[in-house]
């Protein structure tokens, strides 16, 4: 019995770690889920307030993603989401906070960044997504998916807003401006810009 006790404890620790991962991360992309991303963003706001720092938020939406699902199926669409998540992770810093916002939307919090630096980071992400070639095999059929693009909106703390929901709304507004201006581009939130 004494020999089994360490095995049981170890097994329980592994299960707890797996449950924590499932509760905080998106199953399709491995990124933070919306709830965990918001929790970490709220913590970042508190830190930024204490230290008089700034940060930027990027809201990334894949352009015409429904066409990928319609042409290749949802499993291929999931492979694209996974590839986009990997591209975003590659183009960001280890301490940036990346999450899947929902559907084909992703969100990134960039500590210490002002609008110009965030714009450069967003352009790197936009270019990386546009260069993706996703190859997946489903039921013996190979699907090669190219031409995926993203529209990205930027909002900054404290310039745009000081509450995370307001910052997200501003980034969302900027992202929709990118869509209406032709897609596959980066737009920073501006109060002066028309809705």
Image (cartoon, rainbow, N blue to C red):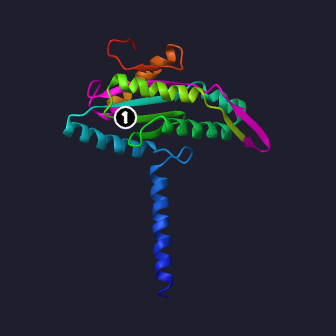
> Could you tell me which residue is drawn at 40 percent across and 42 percent down?
37
- Which image quarter: residue 161? top left
Q: Is mark 1 on a helix, strand or loop?
A: strand
Horizontal side of residue 95 vs 75, given as left or right:
left
Residue 144 position within the rendered picture, expressed as x and y whole percent measured from the top left? 72, 33
Residue nearest the viewer, comparing 67 with 133: 133
Q: Report the residue at 38% width, 31% height from top.
A: 57
Q: Is residue 110 found left or right of 159 in the rendered image?
A: right
For residue 180: magenta? no
Q: Position of residue 3 (x, y in %)?
A: 50, 85
From the viewer's perspective, is residue 24 above or below residue 73?
A: below
User: Dot 1, how many residues are within 10 Å of its Cα: few (below 14), some (14-19), or many (20+)?
Assistant: many
Would you say 71 lies left or right of 86 here?
right
Kindly indicate the quadrant of the structure image that contains residue 133.
top right
Numbered range of the magenta stretch? 137-165
Q: In this view, does 101 lie to the left or right of 49?
A: right
| Vertical side of 75 occupied by 192: above or below | above
Say which residue label 1 marks: 110
- Classify the position of the C terminus by image quarter: top left
């Amino acid at each position: 019995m004494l020999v089994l006790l360490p095995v049981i404890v170890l097994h329980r620790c592994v299960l707890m770690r797996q449950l924590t991962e499932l509760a905080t991360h998106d199953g399709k992309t491995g990124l933070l889920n919306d709830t965990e991303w918001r929790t970490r963003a709220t913590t970042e706001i508190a830190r930024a307030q204490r230290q008089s720092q700034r940060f930027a938020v990027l809201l990334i939406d894949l352009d015409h993603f429904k066409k990928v699902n319609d042409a290749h199926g949802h499993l291929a669409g999931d492979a694209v989401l996974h590839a986009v998540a990997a591209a975003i992770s590659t183009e960001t810093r280890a301490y940036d906070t990346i999450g899947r916002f929902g559907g084909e939307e992703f969100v990134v919090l960039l500590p210490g960044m002002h609008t110009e630096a965030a714009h450069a980071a967003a352009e790197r992400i936009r270019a990386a997504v546009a260069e993706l070639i996703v190859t997946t095999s489903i039921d013996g059929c190979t699907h090669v998916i190219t031409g995926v693009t993203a529209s990205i909106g930027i909002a900054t703390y404290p310039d745009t807003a000081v509450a995370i929901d307001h910052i997200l709304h501003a980034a969302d507004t900027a992202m929709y401006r990118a869509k209406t201006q032709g897609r596959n581009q980066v737009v920073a939130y501006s109060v002066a810009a028309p809705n």
